[in-house]
Amino acid sequence: MPLHQASTRVWDTRRTEKKRRLEQVRAVADGKVLPTDKITAILEALILPGDRVVLEGNNQKQADFLSRMLAKVSPQKIHDLHMIMPSVSLPEHLDLFEQGIARKLDFAFSGSQSLRISQLLEDGQLEIGAIHTYIELYARLFVDLVPNVALIAGFKADRKGNLYTGASTEDTPALVEATAFKDGIVIAQVNELVDDETDLPRVDIPGSWVDFVVVADRPFFIEPLFTRDPRLIKPVHVLMAMMAIKGIYAKHQVQSLNHGIGFNTAAIELLLPTYGERLGLKGKICRHWTLNPHPTLIPAIESGWVETVHCFGGELGMEEYIRARPDIFFTGADGSMRSNRAFCQLAGQYAVDMFIGSTLQIDGLANSSTVTRGRLSGFGGAPNMGHDPHGRRHATPAWLDMIEEPDPMLPGRKLVVQMVETYQAGAKPSFVEKLEAVDVGKGAGMPLAPVMIYGQDVTHVLTEEGIAYLYRARSMEERRAMVAAVAGITDIGLGVDAKRVADLRRRELVVYPEDMGIRRSDASRSLLAAGNIADLVEWSGGLYQPPAKFRSW
Amino acid sequence: MPLHQASTRVWDTRRTEKKRRLEQVRAVADGKVLPTDKITAILEALILPGDRVVLEGNNQKQADFLSRMLAKVSPQKIHDLHMIMPSVSLPEHLDLFEQGIARKLDFAFSGSQSLRISQLLEDGQLEIGAIHTYIELYARLFVDLVPNVALIAGFKADRKGNLYTGASTEDTPALVEATAFKDGIVIAQVNELVDDETDLPRVDIPGSWVDFVVVADRPFFIEPLFTRDPRLIKPVHVLMAMMAIKGIYAKHQVQSLNHGIGFNTAAIELLLPTYGERLGLKGKICRHWTLNPHPTLIPAIESGWVETVHCFGGELGMEEYIRARPDIFFTGADGSMRSNRAFCQLAGQYAVDMFIGSTLQIDGLANSSTVTRGRLSGFGGAPNMGHDPHGRRHATPAWLDMIEEPDPMLPGRKLVVQMVETYQAGAKPSFVEKLEAVDVGKGAGMPLAPVMIYGQDVTHVLTEEGIAYLYRARSMEERRAMVAAVAGITDIGLGVDAKRVADLRRRELVVYPEDMGIRRSDASRSLLAAGNIADLVEWSGGLYQPPAKFRSW
């Protein structure tokens, strides 16, 4: 038997190095509190070239002060950083690369910075590790992307580092845990410093996980990304929403669900108290939700449709409404919301019957992507919510309803619904032979095309033409014909003949509005429970306080 | 447009009810601290009939004091509880049902109580909601199984409720978050109460999430479930481990992985510093791990194979070893491990190349289950780790290696390896025509058979006969033949003829040891880096302190 040879290895290099770095700033720090005006020099002491640095950029909450200050460090001192960012959403996030401070980027979503990422990549100033879904990125923090430093954001902190994140807790717990428990350095920017824990509304992150707090020069940046003004909902959205409610939600008894963001799903939310009520569906569908606090959900909540809502993050303007509805939302003892993107993504993956969302491009087999030419927009959460988790084992009526043959060895399926108009604005067809993502992937040197949701996971495609029940397709050829049958006058849609469509409708593999007893002429905006933002405010009893840009009064 | 009708609904029933219940025990409580000797009466005041009660039963950490005290409440006062338990592992967990205190059970794993659950179910004393994977169960806490009360366990608490869970943080954060932020009541049993936060090693759960702490009558129950004595590893395990290392790990460059528990995978861990070293694989495979701190991993860690290990929970005896290896394990500033089952399950699902585990029964298409006649053992984490998450988007060499055709629209795959001897102890074949789980499921009135891992997700089956590379099968018929080719002299194995096997081997769809240059006679126990527990202690430099039952000296 081989004998053990005494190891001479040192096993606490990270801990020793952390101690060394903390020592560097001890003189300038007041305990855990860092001076706002010296933060750039402090970052130069706490960060080393080549470090993996997590920078909190979420959908709603941005460590924007820390990212601006990081962009000011000397590239001679700090360079080749490997940035890990859930969301790349601010210009300074990319300034880091332009200035040579950072080199490699692992991220999940980019949004408004997607064009510039493509450009920097092309210019060789940025190297992409990978583009992830949110929880996939968090997962790697515990495996092969362990961070050296995390720069995060909260509302308030006390002098011991206890953190109140506010309603947008979002990604913070995941980012901090991976860093704090692997001898990384956690620095939190806050809007306000208080002396003692008793001055905090509650503790979202324990002080013993946080090394430093710093008061930002101004409150962190936050944007109302999930507000859709009902004024912009068109009759075609109403039509599609009616089909969704009758032909999918009611048909399969969808009780728990996630709505993506968009006017299509906003229309569904606003049709529940009217059209849904008329169909007698209250209490039978849409009882449990995992989504951001969409203002368009207010009428459904007020009229008693909604039992619970768990949120990824917050939404500007919804704070007081949520505070007044603790039976529905998850809130702390202080009354403000507690969101948590990791758990909400888990819930959306494992605990809900259905994901429904829009897309930009979809091919003949229902593969889809929002990555289009020149835009590396990333994935966010959709590929996670929008796939069938084979590790799920509990049964619900909707999940079981996806089984086509009576066989105890066949599992149920999550409903994954793609809801898309056959044409985008600008007369650009949504249905295409080949996703632009294929060429974007090639151009960016990605090993695979950045597909958002794979066709194999899509159970339904819904357009203004009708619904294709793809889970019932018995072959790829049939699947393709079903997609074509709802693809309208796009090239894909013209690829199926009238006789085949008639047969698909006869067999109820595809249904058109008239097959469901829905008259296109009934699809009127007057069915919406709220026609504009002011109506939503009224529904909320004045509790919803929309940001200025949504006010027309 | 419909006008909003002012709602008369009360929106804070949970909050009000919580306040009312807390008021009931105010007189007997000392702030947040409950008296140990009055806890049964207190539970009768804090819990109501029909409540959803989370009871922390993990793999390693049990809220056993609270469960014993709950079993003493009067069934006249408290009945029809809906228990939510990750792991049903102690007799008193089921006493609750026998005594009429609880009625419905949602759980993930049962283990030693699996026989009795079946019996209670048959006798109509227990109703099963569903059997889940761990993270699926956590997910539902945020959706349709929101708890009223959570009974949890920690090592130490201060008087403000700040909790130090010890190394087995495990499920606690998920269970507490879902309860605390939906106006549920959180009660923590601890081994020790300290006055102040500064007397705690660290804070794992903030006090503002915890309503009450109570010092248990004795330290919580903990069991070394993940320790495998190398003495019990047989030459056949060594042979299978050699095949795994050469024919799977090295072939596909598996860099991050999860090992299930068992002598098969323990053999692999112990072969890395010997056989793996000889093949020149150090630094090329097995760098990042998600698993409990298996003592059999010590030699691989000591000889420099392992870069990181993130753990679901702790393991008795490994505390000091982990404390001395912070570069490898996730530890707090205090030095003790921080585990987290939710994040480790996420990591095992989304961030690792491979899951490898054993099973009890596997059918001709590689569907498998550990649920056998009369035993509702549950799922634990395997179905989650053991499936291909379609929501993954980042590429690794192993993941890409599962793609058989060059097509940018084809995603990679997670490696899911089932490692099983063709016969179990007692000459019971592992390969069967029909899983016993099918009849168990029917008998228990489950809508589907309790399948652990579906064959569609299995990429490799490894037996003492050889490896079947199932991801390469081009039809169900070929898949079946490949499984049969490694199923030995079981009925399944006898269902394929020699000519077909020769063809499968020629095409390298199936390999036998000799095809890989492995001689069966070389598979000797002498290859194990440690032959017994004492060797592991020696490898660890005396840091590993095995529980008494594993000591033979």
Image: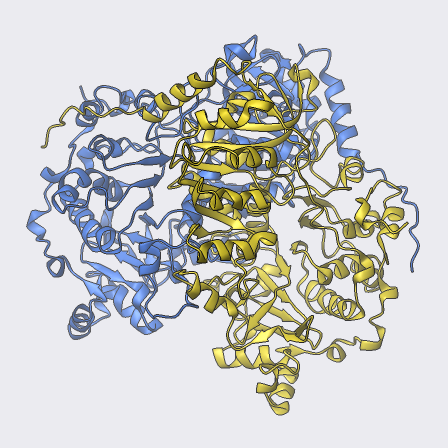
Chain colours: A blue, B yellow
Q: Position of residue A435 (x, y in %)?
A: 38, 58
Total number of numbered discs in the rendering: 0
Please identify the residue farthest to the left as the structure is shown.
A521
Q: Is A527 displayed left or right of B469 in the figure?
A: left
Residue A121 visible to the viewer: no
User: In terms of image quadrants, where is residue B59?
Assistant: top right
B230 and B446: which is toward the camera: B446
Answer yes or no: is residue B211 visible.
yes
Comparing B544 with B194, the one in front is: B194
Is residue A357 rendered to the left or right of residue B266?
A: left
Q: Toward the viewer: B82 or B227?
A: B82
Q: In which quadrant is the N terminus of chain B drawn?
A: top left
Q: Position of residue A190 (x, y in %)?
A: 52, 17
On screen, residue A499 above or below B32: below
Q: Is residue A156 above or below residue B437?
A: above
Tell me where residue A431 appears, x and y as whole percent. Answer: 29, 58
B348 to A332, vertically: above or below: below
Quadrant position of residue B32 = top right
Lateral position of residue A340 relative to residue A366, left or right? right
